[in-house]
Amino acid sequence: MTFFKFIRYKNLLLIALTQILVHYGFLKALNLPTALSHFNFALLLIATVLIAAAGYVINDINDVVSDRINKPTKTYIPSSFSESFAFTIYLALNIAGVGIGFLMCYSMDLTNFATLFVLISALLYVYANFLKQLIIIGNLVVSIAVASSIFIVIIFDMLPLLNRFQQELITPMSILRDYGIFALMLNFLREIIKDIEDTNGDHAAGIQSLPIVLGLERTAKLSAYIAVIYIFTILGYIYAYLQANVWTSIYLVAAVVVPLVFFCIKARYADKQIHYTFLSKLLKLIMLLGIVSLGVLTLTLKF
């Protein structure tokens, strides 16, 4: 169990759930043409999860100093693991993930796309070692990496068939693209809150995060203002594209918009560590509920 906590198994399950919903709960459920066979989808899922796990490991290796301050009772690198052993685990997960990705591309005759797995792996490494120390840019990069779990399914499941089935796939592809963008937006907001949580350790490690520059309470208020922008963006999206889909609209308002309004209220007055931890967990729940909305959309379109 210690190892599974080390690789953040809960986050990995969320990534797996997202890709399963996209492939089986949306594309397959609506009988849309897909390029991935069951076997190749399994390879894509495993490759994505392994590379993501490697990203969490390398991030923990580089966060040892800050984690000792931020989470003294919850260090992610197990005491039985040396730093060199943790790095060996990182290499093993990375090589396995990239290798399985290459195998999938070879079996689909899409070898030109194989470099995507290398690029995502490299992006996570560069983030953990360099970009994390850059204000905003680090938050944006890791959010792009999270959203890539949706975009990579679009790339391998839909792009190879787009020329043949453009009429059938163009709208579903746009929907999934929008889900990827919303996932990026929500994760970006959560990264800001996580920076507030980790301010003391980041300061000791020499990381210039947004809360260190602006202060904790100002950054929390800023996150509330960003959430307000998100709320109006989602409401505008519902009005423009989902007005006729009543049940999906109701779900999004109840499961995403209302919790974001609650987030704004709590963030506006947050000034303690317990408040920031609550806000981080709330955003994670909103992200989960947002992903589930894809299943709700599928049901309304199907029935």
Image (cartoon, rainbow, N blue to C red):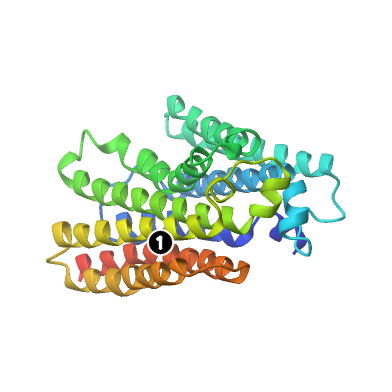
Residue 144 is left or right of residue 261, and the answer is right
- x and y percentages locating residue 148 in the rendered image: 44, 43
- Does residue 87 appear in this view? yes
Residue ID at (30%, 46%): 177
- x and y percentages locating residue 104 in the rendered image: 50, 37
User: What is the quadrant of the N terminus in the image?
Assistant: bottom right
Residue 224, picture quadrant: bottom left
- Does residue 30 appear in this view? no
Of residues 66 and 299, the one drawn nearer to the viewer in this rendering: 66
- x and y percentages locating residue 282 in the rendered image: 48, 69
Of residues 218 and 299, the one drawn nearer to the viewer in this rendering: 218
* Number of numbered discs visible in the structure rendering: 1
Tell me if mark 1 has few (under 14), some (14-19) or many (20+) residues whose alpha carbon lies within 10 angstroms of its own.
Answer: many
Residue ID at (24%, 69%): 248
Residue 107 is left or right of residue 58, and the answer is left
Residue 253, picture quadrant: bottom left
Secondary structure under the numbered disc 1 in the rendered image:
helix
**Residue type (three-letter) at the residue carrying disc 1:** Ala
Residue 278, picture quadrant: bottom right
Of residues 120 and 282, the one drawn nearer to the viewer in this rendering: 282
Residue 7 is left or right of residue 152, and the answer is right
- x and y percentages locating residue 279 in the rendered image: 51, 67
Residue ID at (31%, 54%): 27
Q: Residue furthest left?
A: 244
Q: List the residue tagged with mark 1.
A: 224
